[in-house]
Image (spheres, grey):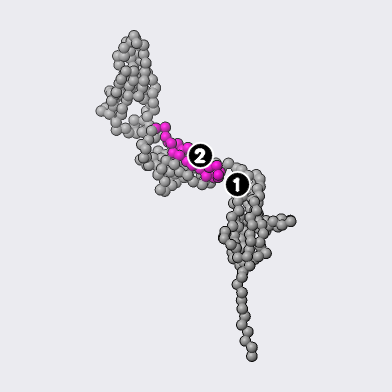
Amino acid sequence: MCTYSYPSTTTVQKSFWFTKVQDGEPVDLLTDSQYTGRVTYSSKSKDSTLTITNVGNSDSAVYKFRFITTQQCCLKFPLCSLSTHPDLHVKVGTSIFSSSWADLTCVSSCTLPPHSSYIWFKNGEKIPRKTSSTYSDYFNNADSYSCALQEHQDFPSPPVALILNKHAPKLPSVSVSPSAEIVEGSSVTLTCSSDANPAATFKWYKRNQTPQYLHEGAQLVFNYIQPSASGEYYCKSENKLGRKRSGYVSINVKCDETFWVALLSWP
């Protein structure tokens, strides 16, 4: 819709919409053969609405409105650009918990039907079974995402490349498996995790008067744990930007109370 104004002492003689100019004069859409039978104007006081039916690719254009008064002519307004497919782009939101997690939203400058179905692409490949306007995922550095409407999948949004922010490791957390009572001879795994970019390396220590270095790696595994392994453990995470140490986690290994009885036979 175009809203326009003019002095009260004048009268509008003619108003129309156009996209083309021939011989210096705009061509009224009502007389343009490209729009025959598909264009209607709805005019009220000082506004005009253009309606186009059966819109196709050839209708993409900048549409302008012109009105002529008794005192002034040739007044025109570049009003809007019409595209036959939605102008989409990907809006990126990142998680406060992980630098490698992104919440993506496919948005349009147009008003789309409320139940529109979407397609998501990762690095140019279609992501299966993702049809809503939002998509969330862990991503690798420089992964690119784009979106499209199901009915206009040949017109995807421009791809957006996600770049990880580099940072030192955050405070590591330690988990113990199994978390139940630990008995001598069982298998126990300690896992250290920390959000970092670049990825962190991990080292394990046992708390003593002098810290005892045990192992390098995200997991510390006891295949057949002994009571002597009881104590407090911690891990360190490190990359080229810094290092962090976890809190202590305690392990209490209970003795295996199974008794073996030997039967001796006397001659």
Name the residue carrying label 2. Answer: 93
Of labels 1 and 2, earlier in sequence is 2
- Mark 2 Cα within 10 Å, few/some/many (few <14, many 20+)? few
Q: Is residue 71 left or right of residue 177?
A: left
Kind of residue at badge 1: Ala
Q: Is residue 219 above or below residue 168?
A: below
**Which residues are drawn in magenta?**
88-110
Q: Is residue 175 above or below residue 137?
A: below
Q: Residue at x 61, y 74 (%)?
A: 259
Of residue 6 and residue 121, the one placed in the foreground of this image is 6
Which element type, helix, strand or loop, lies under badge 1?
Answer: loop
Q: Quadrant of residue 215?
A: bottom right
Which element type, helix, strand or loop, lies under badge 2?
Answer: strand
Q: Is residue 139 left or right of residue 170?
A: left
Q: Residue at x 59, y 60 (%)?
A: 189
Residue 40 picture location, percent across and down: 28, 25
Q: Do we see residue 129 in this rendering?
A: yes
Of residue 41 and residue 181, the one placed in the foreground of this image is 181
Residue at mark 1 to residue at mark 2: CA–CA distance = 19 Å
Residue 147 picture location, percent across and down: 43, 40
Q: Do we see residue 25 in this rendering?
A: no
